[in-house]
Image: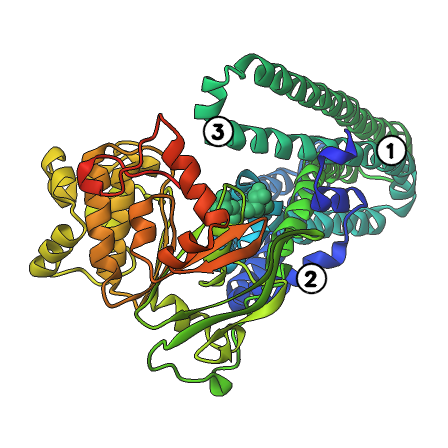
Amino acid sequence: MPRESLDFEEVRSIGGYDFRQLLRLLPLIRPHRALLAGSIALVLLITLLDLALPLLIRHAIDRLILPPSGGGPPAAVEAALQGLLLTAAAFALLVVLHFLFSFVQSVLMETTGQRIMHDLRMRLYTHTQDLPLAFFAKNPVGRVVTRLTGDIQNLYELFTSLLSFLFKDLLLIAGIAAVLLVLDWRLALVTFLVLPPVAAAAAVFSRRAREIFRTLRIQAAEINTRFAETIGGLRLIQIHRAETRNFERFARLNLENYRTGMDQIRVLAVFLPLIEVLSLAAVALVIGYGGSRIPGGAVSLGALVAFLTYIRMFFRPLRDLAEKYNVLQNALASVERIFLIFDTPNPLREPPAAGAPRLTRIEELRFENVDFAYAPGEPVLRGISFALRRGATTAVVGPTGAGKSTLLQLIPRLYEPTAGRILLNGIDLRSWPKAAIRDRLALVLQDPTIFSGTLRENIFQGLPPPRRAEEARIVEAARLEHLLERLPAGLDSRLGEGGSTISTGERQLVAIARAFARNPEIILFDEATSAVDSETEQAIQEALLGLLAERTALLVAHRLSTVRAAEEILVLLGGRILESGTHAALMERRGFYFRLHQAQAEDGTRPLRDSPCTGRPPVL
Ligand code: ADP
């Protein structure tokens, strides 16, 4: 496995697991401790029953079956027969009790497990929703989703199987060892001769298995990531006809995974029969040594049969150990990954509620020498200073990659400046609760996210159900009539996942409708660069102008008509503000903005027509 293809967390996992991680699960268990205690108490009872059954067999053989066969007075035979019936009845009773206890115990245990996982999933979901976006740049979505689903399932299995191992199996093993020693310590010690080889086999197995499980897990993560990325980028892959190369990469990954899987099977294929052989060796020892002691009367036949029964019981959990080990390994990795999410520091920490300033209305949003980098050492924005004043529209123009979209995303604090400050009414944005700014702004992205659901749910997402009049007002303001005419069920139409059933322009109209529905003080608008048909284009322009009226706005603009709507224009180049001013002032300056403008005017393929009514406006 090439290490460079793994990110930091997988590499961390290679270093081995810390069992102390498990202690961190205790707070999750605490609320359910009553259920758990009930379950453990039942396990104790079940173990006692398990231990009692062979003793009953011994009693039946030694006291009731053997003596009468040697002949005796009919009364004694009669009494023995009755005793046998009674013993059989007791045996049946114990078996029924065993069944009932086991049933209740496993229901209790699984309920506890399910509840803990339910809590954990809620916590993880809430935490994931609050994570800074920067986290997802480092952690592919496929991996995070695996965590929310697969890792929690692993933990569930850890919980049920580890606890049952600790309380059921270990207890049973210890109990059996104790009973054997009491029954006949010499025979017990001879039987225990097989234990050193069992321990050696387990040690070799666990070392070998650990490496294999680890590799398997890393490979599974890579396969998941590859799947998620492939599906996410399918359009591009199909257009670039990259299927074959992708297929080859995936085939290689899959083959490695298959080989490791086969290694695992080989290891298990040796371990399981080996344990079986050792268990039969113990049986042979009991029959050989124990049998030889029967004639002398040192061992009774009943004790011998009980021994044999105990030995089969003793080895059963040992055989399961292999499987439990697998679960444990997987689960430890899962615990570690889940806590890695919980431990991700959230730089967007809320200021203490008591100390937070109160916001009445947004007067000014000021950038002061703001720097920003997605990756350390690769600045995307440098020394940005400007102010958005109440009610004014500011446009940002500049070539692709200049940092325009990034600038926009700093305002809702999707990312934090790496240096400098953003001031809201003169106070650092970080001193305000996140909600202060987020509740008052609407962000319209180039390619807005559409959630699977109806058009209405998409527009009013996170808001109380709208009234009819409100709906009609928003449909009109956002110029959604054309879209609604096309959709048979109107606002109740279900949009395909990711909005694949409506065009990019229409998606942007839906996003504008979302903004209207929120009635925000600030609009952050990232104009789509992609071509949109002129009718939709015009609808977007009109809707946007309506949205901008009376509101504070920062627009990333590509079309001249949008730029013209702005009181101030910032020209961004290479992450810096090169020039700023009104359209007229910038044209007069004859600087970069002027040249950008001229270049497009001269581009014969894109005539300069700046009114949306006369066709498609120029793209700056
Ligand atoms: P613009 O909107 O002007 O086209 P962006 O703000 O999208 O520019 O991007 C500015 C720079 O930041 C580009 O070099 C881009 O590659 C980089 N960039 C954008 N988003 C990310 C991201 N999520 N992670 C890392 N780099 C990014």
The residue carrying mark 2 is 23
Residue contact between numbered discs 2 and 3, judged by CB atoms under 8 Å: no
> Alpha-carbon neighbours of circle 1 within 10 Å: few (<14), some, or many (≥20)?
few
- Across and down, in percent, residue 35 comes to 51, 63
Residue 311 occupies quadrant:
top right
- Across and down, in percent, residue 403 comes to 53, 50
Dot 3 falls on a residue whose secondary structure is loop
Q: Label 1 vs label 3: CA separation?
A: 44 Å
Left/right of residue 137 with respect to residue 233 in the rendered view: right
Colour convention of the picture: rainbow
- Give the mark nearest the N terminus, 1 or 3: 1
Residue 521 occupies quadrant:
bottom left
Residue lying at 26% horizontally and 31% vertically, measured from the top left: 501
Instruction: Name the quadrant where ligand 1 sits.
Output: top right
> Alpha-carbon neighbours of circle 3 within 10 Å: few (<14), some, or many (≥20)?
few
Name of the residue lying farthest toward the top: 244
The relative height of residue 445 versus residue 195 in the rendered view (above or below) is below
Residue 187 occupies quadrant:
top right
Depth check: give the residue in front, 407 or 431. 407
The residue carrying mark 3 is 233
The residue carrying mark 1 is 204
Depth check: give the residue in front, 460 or 414. 414
> Which quadrant does the C terminus fall into?
top left
Q: Label 2 vs label 3: CA separation?
A: 40 Å
- Give the mark nearest the N terminus, 2 or 1: 2
Residue 325 seen by the camera? yes
Residue 90 seen by the camera? no
> Alpha-carbon neighbours of circle 2 within 10 Å: few (<14), some, or many (≥20)?
few
Residue lying at 28% horizontally and 39% vertically, measured from the top left: 617
Q: Amino acid at mark 1?
A: Val
